[in-house]
Amino acid sequence: MTMRLLRLVTTSIMALGAIAVAPQDIEPAAGAAPDHALVGAPFEVTAFNICSLNCSDGSLPTGGQFTNFGLVPANELIVLAEAYDWPRVIALNEVCGQTAWSLTAELPAGLYAASYYVSARRPDAGCALYGNWVAVRTGDIPATRSTEVHYYWDGGTPPPGDDTSENRGGPCLRSFIYLEQTWGCSAHLATSSQATTLLSWANTQFGTTPQLMLGDFNLEPGTGPITSWDNSNRNDVFAAIPVTFEGTAKHFDYGWGHQTALEFVPLATAHQSASDHHQLWGDVRFR
């Protein structure tokens, strides 16, 4: 397998002047197989905190290598994604803006939409824009191929203007997977209260519509807010993976989906990474 280099995107991110960047309309790729041919089959999702700021050579217990603000973990993701014919939902945390746009350029043409939400400005660390990224396969219904997006900010509505502090916001993208309307979200939380607020927001925003909330919650299973997510008729697709964060050897990363709409196939894998988090993969099926 040949690993392609990330293509540089020359568009100036700073010139956008917006906290959230919405996806563009997506058109079907020539010869793309329709999703409805695979109704009932499991589909893959992945979540990955790529550690674009704080990892350094020799900083990981496993002796992992990290360089260039996310480009090494991002390349790892591309290699695996190509090997697995690309998952239907990809959610990334701690993504620098230049990496977000480079990854978006690598998505299979005509099949995916991506959205990036800037949670912080970190020029002191060489990462001017810093936040969460999500990509979804847009499905095979031409009339609905324009992908709708919702953004959360600490689980709620973002404040107006350009906030320079590290608030936790993220994108959710609508897709049609195997003809089923589905939402894929990327979340990276810092506090227990954010996890509680995000759950309330997700319940109000999506109800029981199939929805996957993927990302780093910085909370262990059994803690109060995680118990609330467990008790909200949701399952964690990555529950079988005991360690998702190498820094403290704990399970901090989740993939929440409604039990009534989604069934998790008993297969979840964690790939060792140059990041301090594992790259997580799981299989999901519509009930």
Image (cartoon, helix red, strand yellow):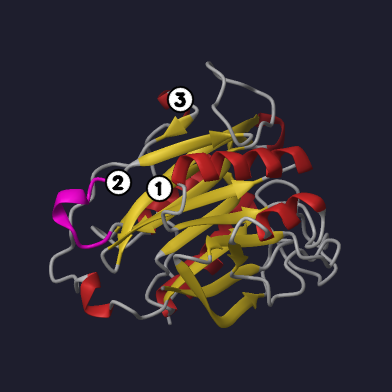
**Number of other residues with Cα within 10 Å of mark 1, as a class: few under 14, some 14 to 19, many 20 or more:** many
Seen in the picture, residue 54 relative to 2 is either above or below; the reply is: above
Residue 92 position by quadrant: bottom right
Magenta: predominant secondary structure element? Answer: loop
Residue position for label 3? 18
Query: Which residue corresponds to the image point at 56% horizontal and 19% vertical from the top-left?
Result: 162
Q: Is residue 30 magenta?
A: no
Q: Which mark is residue 173?
A: 1
Closer to the camera: disc 2 or disc 3?
Answer: 2
> What's drawn in magenta, residue-wise?
139-146
User: Label 1 vs label 2: CA separation?
Assistant: 7 Å
Residue 9 in view in this figure: yes
Mark whose residue sits in front, 3 or 1: 1
Nearest to N terminus: mark 2 or mark 3: 3
How many numbered marks appear? 3
| Kind of residue indicated by mark 1 | Leu
Q: Circle 2 sits on which residue?
A: 147
Q: Camera-side residue: 57 or 100?
A: 100
